[in-house]
Amino acid sequence: MTTKRFFMACAISGFVAAGFFTSAFAQPVFENPSATAGSDTSQKANAMADKGMYKEVQYANAGKRGPMLVVIPGEIKSNNATFTQKFSSNNIADFGELELGKANFGILERSDMGPLMNEFQIAYTMGDPNAARKVLQKGKMKTTKWVVRFDVIKAEQVASAQEGFDGRAIGGLISILGGGRGGAAGGVAAGSIQTGETTGVWIIGMRYKIMDANTTEQVANGYTEEKMEVGAKGTSVLGVSSSAQGGLTLDGMVQRLVQKLVWEIDSKHK
């Protein structure tokens, strides 16, 4: 084998090996076991679901290491039963830890704090610097600079609208005025038309507070809110019906609000 052919063979082997390792360590892809996979309804539902999927935020100062902090569960001040049944303050704190970690802040996991967590949270909720200092002198807590909390202070459905069409009255009128079989057929067709559409809009507001770990004094705060729209529509003609419903979930909305607030913390306070 000539030297040229030898190097060509090595190069081809390298490309094949690179392709093998790329495929071997690629992110797993899972198949859809749904009975309707690939159908029109599946495609429509998946297109709506794609818009609600988690999307990463590119934090402006993620290249800069932020201070060590602890995220403590905040408050949920909404009286809306749907929201309070769905969420706890721990859920929101989990989202906060996730996004602050992606923004390159040092995160002291609440699970690592063990029995200190309740003592720690009470100290900062009550604004008791002496109790806070006692906790901070223990173990991993010594490196903590900030305490961050996210509070939901608004979660309410502020608007709803619906409209529809019922063809039965018009169908009856066509049958009377049209006469004969043609009029009767037209009346049946028109009377079978049923359409409906309903939309509800929520406004959910969230704030953050950053407190100095040693003094319990507030360092910074901010607020943001977003609209969440949920809708459904349906149509039925001559026994053939179609319907669709969707919208961003409460989970998705809360995570987006946390992302907006973490973006502000990263941009303004790092």
Image: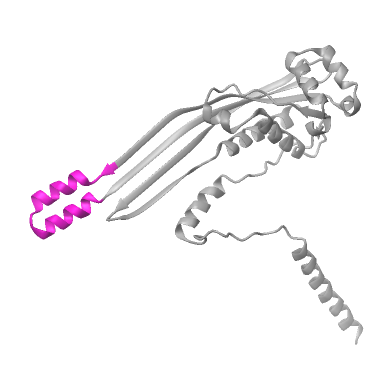
The residue at 79%/25% (across/down) is: 117
The residue at 59%/39% (across/down) is: 252
Measured along the vertical axis of the image, is residue 23 above or below residue 237?
A: below
Count of number-bearing discs: 0
Residue 123 location, quadrant: top right
Q: Can you give x and y, in whole percent of width and height, for residue 259 in the image? A: 66, 35
The quarter in which the C terminus is drawn is top right
User: Is residue 191 covered in magenta?
Assistant: yes
The residue at 40%/49% (across/down) is: 243
The residue at 25%/51% (across/down) is: 192
User: Is residue 78 covered in magenta?
Assistant: no
Q: Which residues are magenta?
A: 165-192
The quarter in which the N terminus is drawn is bottom right
User: How was this image coloured?
Assistant: one colour
Measured along the vertical axis of the image, is residue 242 above or below residue 202?
A: below
Residue 83 location, quadrant: top right
Q: Viewer-proximal residue, 245 or 16? A: 245
